[in-house]
Image: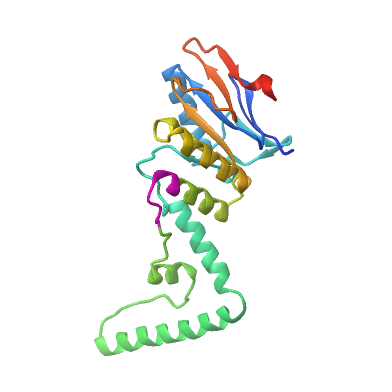
Amino acid sequence: MMNLTLSKYGIEPNISISETHFFTLSIENKAYLLSVLSELRTQTEDGKEGTFHLLLNDKELNLEKSVSIIFDFTDIDFNSKKITNQIIKKFTDFLTFGEQLENLSKLESLVLNMAEDFRISSGLNVEYDTVMNGTNLAKVCSLRIADRGRSLLERLCEYVSLICDLKPLKLFVLVFGKQFLIEHDLQVLYKYCADIGVRLLVIEGVDKTERLPNEMRLIIDESLCSFTQGHDEI
């Protein structure tokens, strides 16, 4: 069994997430919660060094490449700059294979001839790119990810699937997820993630919900004392 462990100095025991459950980290001390979330954001979104470490069967993983986090459920961005850049890279790679390379050459010649004809006929001192590539073609085509999910659950599942297509995602993190998802939806999301090989971590403040059968929980109270729930069942 492949075991995924997220560790951080000051949080004990480690957050260990197997294939058979999801994990809830409940931090009741507001100041510490904000500190933890801030550091997690800088490590996973900005690629900075920090005290969080992610291990898969004792092999350390890059957090920026392996973790995706939803901080704001009202603004799930399917076309963030990072996602758009990865799509453009995939599109560029696609254009360099087989018949696409020949088509790209023909298109480049056609577009450049049109640009030159315009320069001559208009009398304007215009300049233009002389190389057709994935970046400018993506702009011409307005390549973007369609966000067709109707419910929050559908959008979350589509978002996880998208990130998996773009990078080797191992851990999906929801901040205050239990405030937006009912028990059934959380179970569906956990099952969806498990089916595609992604572990689920939910980070909460005070969590008064009843622990689910497939949930493990670590509670850090106001005095920063730790209490576990469900750990004795594995």
Expressed as whole percent of the image width and height from the top left, the position of residue 56 reads 69, 38
| Left or right relative to 72: residue 95 | right
Expressed as whole percent of the image width and height from the top left, the position of residue 110 reads 43, 86
Residue furthest toward the top? 223
What residue is rendered at 40% in x and 87% in y? 113
**Image quadrant of residue 19?**
top right
154 falls in the magenta region: yes
In the rendered view, how is the structure colored?
rainbow
- Taking depth in this image into account, of 113 and 10 the one nearest to the observer is 10
Quarter of the N terminus within the rendering:
top right
- Taking depth in this image into account, of 131 and 125 the one nearest to the observer is 131
State whether residue 96 is above or below residue 15. Answer: below
Expressed as whole percent of the image width and height from the top left, the position of residue 153 reads 44, 44
State whether residue 40 is above or below residue 67. Answer: above
Expressed as whole percent of the image width and height from the top left, the position of residue 145 reads 43, 59
State whether residue 54 is above or below residue 137. Answer: above
State whether residue 151 is above or below residue 226. Answer: below
119 falls in the magenta region: no
What residue is rendered at 33% in x and 89% in y? 117
Quarter of the C terminus within the rendering:
top right
Marker count (numbered)? 0
- Taking depth in this image into account, of 13 and 103 the one nearest to the observer is 13
| Left or right relative to 156: residue 217 | right
What residue is rendered at 59% in x and 81% in y? 99
Q: Which residues are magenta?
A: 147-155
